[in-house]
Image (cartoon, rainbow, N blue to C red):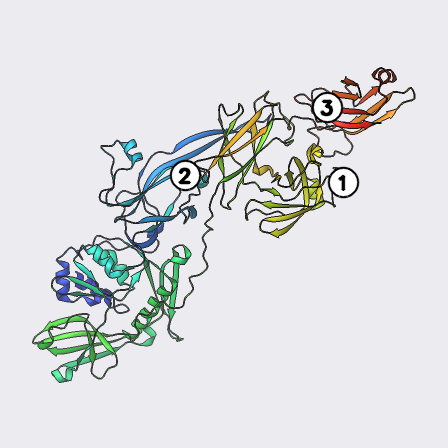
Amino acid sequence: MATLVLTVAGQVLGGPIGGSIGSIAGQYIDQTIIFAPKARQGPRLGDLAVQTSSYGSAIPKLFGTMRVAGTVIWATDLAESRSTSSNGKGRPKTINYSYSASFAVALSARPILGVARIWADGKLLRGAAGDFKSACVFRLHPGDEDQVVDPLIAAAQGAGSAPAFRGVAYALFEDLQLEDYGNRIPSLTFEVEADAGGVAIGAIAGALGGGAVAGGATPALLGYAALGDSVRGAIEALADIVPLSLADDGGILTLAVPGGSAVALDPADEHGRREITRRGAGTMPSEVSIAYYEVERDYQAGLQRATQPGASLVVADRRALPAALSAGEAKAYAEYLLAAAWAARVTAKIVLNWRWCPMRPGDLVALAGELGAWRIRRWTLGPMTIELELVRMTGNALADPAAASPGAPVGQPDLLHGPTTLALLDLPLGDGVGSGPLLFAAAAGIEEGWRRATLSASYDGGGSWQAAGATASPAMIGTALGALAPAGSALFDDRSSLEVELANAAMWLEGRSDDALIGGANAALVGREIIQFGAALPLGANRFLLTRMLRGRRGTEWAASVHEAGEPFIVLDPECLAVLEAPAGSVGGEASLLATGIGDLPDAAAASVTIEGASLQPPSPVHLRAAEIPDGGLLILWVRRSRQGWPWLSGSDTPLAEEVERYRVEISGEGFARTATPEAPFYLYTAEERLADGAAGPIQVSVFQIGTFAQSRPAQLILS
C-alpha cells in the first residue's frame, strides 16, 4: 500500500515522500502503525477556518503557531437577561434583551503553550495583549494529561461525570456576551502557540510517529495542523510540497531532505542497457502556485507563484499547504517545485546486474553521459538483473526565503478597550415632555478601543443601586484647555475661541455651516454652558481650536460668564447620551452613577450630579425691562420662553408647556423685599408700593417662571 501510493505521489514534481520509499521499505511500513492502511486524508486549506460542533469531528495536532477554528465540545443553553432603558418621560420604556453563552472549544489534540489573539466573526475578540473586547470569563486548558475538570463543566454536569478532556487543549468561555454578534454564538478562530518558534518537519513526524520516525535535516514551518489516522495521513500534505525522503535502516525511519553524494553508474560497463525519455516542453507546467496561511496577514490564505517563461506553456500546477509560512518561504517552495518539475521531465530506465541490489529508491546516482544527479524512483528485481527507474533532479537547491510580498493585511486594528471616562449630566435636553427629571450619561474611553459599559444608578447616596442599562455609543469627551470668554447668546460669537483636547485619537471634530448650526448641529457642553461651534481647526495631539460659536444654548446663557480652564468638554450627540429617569421628587438630591466596562475591573468609573431638574425647568424669561409711568409706578415687562419651544417659530407663539402661566417677581432694595405672583408676563409696581417700600435707591428686580414641576432661573435687572 505505502509503496504504491507514495511512489505515485513521488512522480509529481519530484522529490515527495512517496518517491523515496522503496518496495522493501514500503512492505515494512505497511506492516506498522506508522503508515497504516486507510489513512485519513490530511487537512486542506480552509479546513481550519470553519468552526465545527459535529460529533466525531477530527481535532488537529498543532505544531508551531497556527490560527484554527476548533471544535465545540461542550456548551450550555443561551442565558437571557433583560434590562429597561428610558426614552424620556412621557414615552414608553424600552425593554432590552441580551444573551450570553458558555461553551468549550477544542483546539489541539496535543498540548499547547497558550493562546494569543482570538477572532469572533472575523473581529478581534481578544487582542495580542490578552485584553478582551467583549465581556466574558476565559479559561485555557493546555491539554496536559493531568489537567483537571473545568469548574463550570463540573458544576453543570456534576463532578463525578464531567470530562477533563485530558490530552486535548481547549478554551472555555463563561458568559460570553453575544450582543456584538447578533445574540448568537459567533464563529471563533484562535491564534494558538503549540511550540515556541518554528518546528522542523522531521520533528513533527517524530512526534506523530511516537519514536518510530526520526527527524533528520528538514525545513522548519512556522505552524502546522496535523490531521489523519496515521503519520502519512498527517503529513502527506507536506509531502506534496516539500522535498522529503524517508530512509529505513531496519530499526527506525529517518525523514530528511533528499541529498548526499551520487553513485556513478554506467550500464555499458555492466552489460546492461539504458532508456532515456524526454517529455515535450508543451506538456510541462508554466506556473506552480502554492496556497498557504500567511503569517503577516493574520493567517489568512495567501498565494505565491513561480513561473517559467514561454508562450507555448499553458499548464498550471496549483498546490495547497495547510501550514503557516512567510511569503518568502512559500515563494521559495514554489520556485523549487517548478524547477524540479522541469528537471523531472527527463526520466531513464537502466538495467544492471545483481551486484547493485543494495541500491534503494531515494538514492542518488550520476548517470554516465548525462548531466546532473538522478534519483532512483523505482527498484524492480528481475532474472539476474535489477531495473532502476530514474528521474533527473533539479540543480537548484531549496533556497532560503525568496523576495515576495505577503499582500496588504485586511485585519482590524488591535485596540485596547481601556477604562471608562464617565459624565453624569443634568441638562435642559429632550423635548420637554414628561413629569420627572431626566439625567444624561456620556461615556467614552481614554483608549481608542473602548466600546461600552454597564450602568448602575443610585439616588439615595449609595444606599441602594439599580441597573440602569448600558452606555450609548462612545461620546466625544475632552477637556477645555483655556477659559471661554463671556459672550451674549443673541448673535454669533466670532471673537471667542476655545482650545479643547479630546480623550483619545479616534475622536474627531468637524465644522458645520451656519444653517446646520441653526438646526442644532455641533452642540457641546463646556462647563455648564451649552455652545455650538461652526469651525474646528485640528492642532494635532487630539487638540482642536473651536471658533464661530453660538453661546448660551437651551437657556444656559447664565453659565457663559463662569468658565475656567480644565472644564469638561462633551459633544451632545443624542446617539451618544444614555437617558436616565430620576425618581419623582428627587430634585435637590444627588444622583450617582457607576459604569463597569471591560477595562474598569476591579473598580468602576463613577460620576455624580446634584439633581436640579433642568429638563423640567422653564428657561428664564428674557428681555426684562422696566418703564416708569406718569403716576410714579414702574411697569415691569418680560418675554417668556418654553422648554418645548427652542426653535424659533415664525408667525406663531411659543407653546407654554406648563399647566398654567405664572411667574414670581422679587423686588428688593435697601431695607425691603417684595414678592408677587402675576399670571401674565408683566407686573405693575405701583407708586404706592414704591412709597411704602421706601424704594428710593437702587433696586433689583428678579423674575422667575413657575413651571408645573420646577421654577426657572431668574432674569434680573438693576434699577437706579
Q: Could you tell me the amino acid type at mark 3?
A: Gln
Measure the C-alpha gap from mark 3 to mark 1.
24 Å
**Residue 318 appears left or right of 650:** left
The outermost residue toward the left is 384
Type of the residue with mark 1: Leu
Q: CA distance from mark 3 to mark 2?
A: 53 Å
Q: If you read the primary sequence from the N terminus, does the residue marked by circle 3 or circle 1 appear first? A: 1
Q: Which mark, by number, is residue 705?
A: 3
CA neighbours of label 1 inside 10 A, class few (<14), some (14 to 19), many (20+): few
Rendered position, 363 above or below 224: below
Image quadrant assignment for residue 311: bottom left
Question: Which residue shows up at 34% across the image and 46% down it?
Answer: 51
**Earlier along the polypeptide chain: callout 1 or callout 2?**
2
Left or right of residue 655: residue 437: left
Q: Quadrant of residue 717?
A: top right
Q: Give the residue type that dot 2 points to.
A: Arg
Q: Is residue 347 left or right of residue 509?
A: left
Residue 460 at x, y percent in the picture:
53, 23
Where residue 161 appears, x then y in whole percent? 23, 33
What residue is shown with label 1? 491
Residue 87 in view, yes or no: no
Q: Quadrant of residue 188?
A: top left
Q: Secondary structure at mark 2?
A: loop
Q: Which residue is under mark 2?
A: 184
SS under mark 1? loop
Between circles 1 and 2, the one closer to the viewer is: 1
Q: Earlier in the sequence, mark 3 or mark 2?
A: 2
34 to 528, vertically: above or below = below
Name the outermost residue toward the right: 630
Residue 227: x and y in percent read 26, 53
Viewer-proximal residue, 549 or 375? 549
